[in-house]
Image: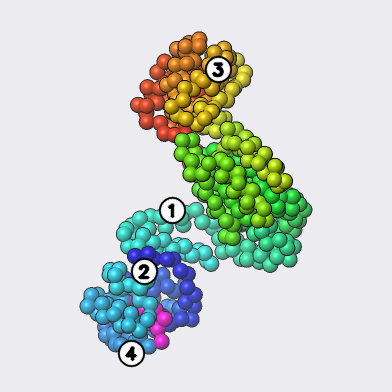
């Protein structure tokens, strides 16, 4: 079954709990903070439940369930010790169109109880569709531990801030971006701002952010998403995503970046990745032109940096040819960041005074093409600095062999590194003579960065 997590206002609504034991008490305790008018009916009421009901002014009827108890009920919890009674209550509720939860009988339920996190106005429901309540409970504990202590104060502040933002920021997209930034700041710092600081943040955004957004409300922004984890994108790139009318994105981005786009933003996946393209480059160029001509801001989101083997210049040229305004926002490139995450700097004093980035992808994109037709390995072998190959994993053995044939020592240090979206890496180190074999044994995944040079042995 597909349980959609609707949030329903039950304040003042009538709710019945049929049962007087431990489970019924647990349901009562969950429901109480939401303000429903609750009634309990059962032939036997535990002392603990009776005490809880008395303390919270809950109506308790000490008798067997009767059909008339369903009158005017918005929802019902069948939590008695008698399975047959619970099943009958479920059947009657379904006939009458009343929402019902039948304990320990998922098929008889029209709704199920989530594992609930409640912090003032914040409510988070976690459900595994009944597959594993233990998993839901474990996640609830983890989530509860990261909620700020002053969550309700933060929510009250952000609620008031919406009216202030509406007064000062007329553009809805810019206003939404401001509110998102403020919400994240309050959450990260577990703090709310006083009136003076709130106005300073607002004025800063109006004066700086809106002016910046005004420059790009039309046209295309080529944005580097960085490599690996979503938080490696620049602040300017993140603001662009939040302002986009259309977002055109590739494989090699952290999908969490898409959550920053507005609900009205059109998301277009073009799936470019080495060796696997769902859309050819010419088609992507035409798509960007088409979307830009429809109006609004189009953001072209590319993994790493658009101008480092990302064909960003091809897209920019195609757009300029059609008279479409286009700007570029750089991203953190994998040729520097991925080795760094593995503890390998591409330069280091007295070890490497330069680094050179080479595409290990053939010019025609043909895996069967001889890489030596596109790369002058004799030139690379004479370089004293670090050599970094991107998109070259499929040709790793040939790269190592050609460098040695051109004069690089067989014992020259080499590494292959694969980076994940959580900023972790899988890396293997060796020399030109054995790196291909070691990478295969370690089952390094693509995409991978190849580093050749003495910096590999610094650690």
Left-right relation of 385 to 14: right
Foreground label between 3 and 2:
3
Q: Give me the disc on residue 132.
A: none
Determine whether, in the image, residue 217 is placed left or right of residue 454.
right
Residue 406 is situated, as x and y percent measured from the top left of the image, at: 50, 11
Give the spatial CA distance, label 1 vs label 3. 54 Å
Residue 351 visible in image: no
Q: Nearer the viewer, mark 2 or mark 1?
A: 2
Nearest to N terminus: mark 1 or mark 4: 4
Q: Which mark is residue 376?
A: 3
Depth check: give the residue in front, 22 or 186.
Answer: 186
SS under mark 3: loop
Mark 3 touches mark 2? (CB < 8 Å): no
Question: What is the C-alpha distance between the residues marked 3 and 2?
Answer: 65 Å
Q: Earlier in the sequence, mark 1 or mark 3?
A: 1
Secondary element at tag 1: helix
Q: Please name which of the two marks, 1 or 3, marks the residue nearer to the observer.
A: 3
Whole-Å distance between the Cαs marked 1 and 4? Answer: 42 Å
Query: What SS does tag 2 mark?
Result: loop
Depth check: 324 or 431 in front? 324
The stretch in magenta equals: 72-77
In this view, 420 is above or below 125: above
Crowd band around label 2 with a 10 angstrom C-alpha radius: few (<14), some (14–19), many (20+): many
Point out which mark residue 68 bears: 4
For the point 58% across and 36% down, the residue is 310
Q: CA distance from mark 2 to mark 4?
A: 24 Å
Q: Which mark is residue 142?
A: 1
Q: Position of residue 371 (x, y in %)?
A: 49, 22
> In the rendered structure, does residue 74 fall within the stretch colored magenta?
yes
Q: Is residue 400 above or below residue 390?
A: above
């Amino acid at each position: 079954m597909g349980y959609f997590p609707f949030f329903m206002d039950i304040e003042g609504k009538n709710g019945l709990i049929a049962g007087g034991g431990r489970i019924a008490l647990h349901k009562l305790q969950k429901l109480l903070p939401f303000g429903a008018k609750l009634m309990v009916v059962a032939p036997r009421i535990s002392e603990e439940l009776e005490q809880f009901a008395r303390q919270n002014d809950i109506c308790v009827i000490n008798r067997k369930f009767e059909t008339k108890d369903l009158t005017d009920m918005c929802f019902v919890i069948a939590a008695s010790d008698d399975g047959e009674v619970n099943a009958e209550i479920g059947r009657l509720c379904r006939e009458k169109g009343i929402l019902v939860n039948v304990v320990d009988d998922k098929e008889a339920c029209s709704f199920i109880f989530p594992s609930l996190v409640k912090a003032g106005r914040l409510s988070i429901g976690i459900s595994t569709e009944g597959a594993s309540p233990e998993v839901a409970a474990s996640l609830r504990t983890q989530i509860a531990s990261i909620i700020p202590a002053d969550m309700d104060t933060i929510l009250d502040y952000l609620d008031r801030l919406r009216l202030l933002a509406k007064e000062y920021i007329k553009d809805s997209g810019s206003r939404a971006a401001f509110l998102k930034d403020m919400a994240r700041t309050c959450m990260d710092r577990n703090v709310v701002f006083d009136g003076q600081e709130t106005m300073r943040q607002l004025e800063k955004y109006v004066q700086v952010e809106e002016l910046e957004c005004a420059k790009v409300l039309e046209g295309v922004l080529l944005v580097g998403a960085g490599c690996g984890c979503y938080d490696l994108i620049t602040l300017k790139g993140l603001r662009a995503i939040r302002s986009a009318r259309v977002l055109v994105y590739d494989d090699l981005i952290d999908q969490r970046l898409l959550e920053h786009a507005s609900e009205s933003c059109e998301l277009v996946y073009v799936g470019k990745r080495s060796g696997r393209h769902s859309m050819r480059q010419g088609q992507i160029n035409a798509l960007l032109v088409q979307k830009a001509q429809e109006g609004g801001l189009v953001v072209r989101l590319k993994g790493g940096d658009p101008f480092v083997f990302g064909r960003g210049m091809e897209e920019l040229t195609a757009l300029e040819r059609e008279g479409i305004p286009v700007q570029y926002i750089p991203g953190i490139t994998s040729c520097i960041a991925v080795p760094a995450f593995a503890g390998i700097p591409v330069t280091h004093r007295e070890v490497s005074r330069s680094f050179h980035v080479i595409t290990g992808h053939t010019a025609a994109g043909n895996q069967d093409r001889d890489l030596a037709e596109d790369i002058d390995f004799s030139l690379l072998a004479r370089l004293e600095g670090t050599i970094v190959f991107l998109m070259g994993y499929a040709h790793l053995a040939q790269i190592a062999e050609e460098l040695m044939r051109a004069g690089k020592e067989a014992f020259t240090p080499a590494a292959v590194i694969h980076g994940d979206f959580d900023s972790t890496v899988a890396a293997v180190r060796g020399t030109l003579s054995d790196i291909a074999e070691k990478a295969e044994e370690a089952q390094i995944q693509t995409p991978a960065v190849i580093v050749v040079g003495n910096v590999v042995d610094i650690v």
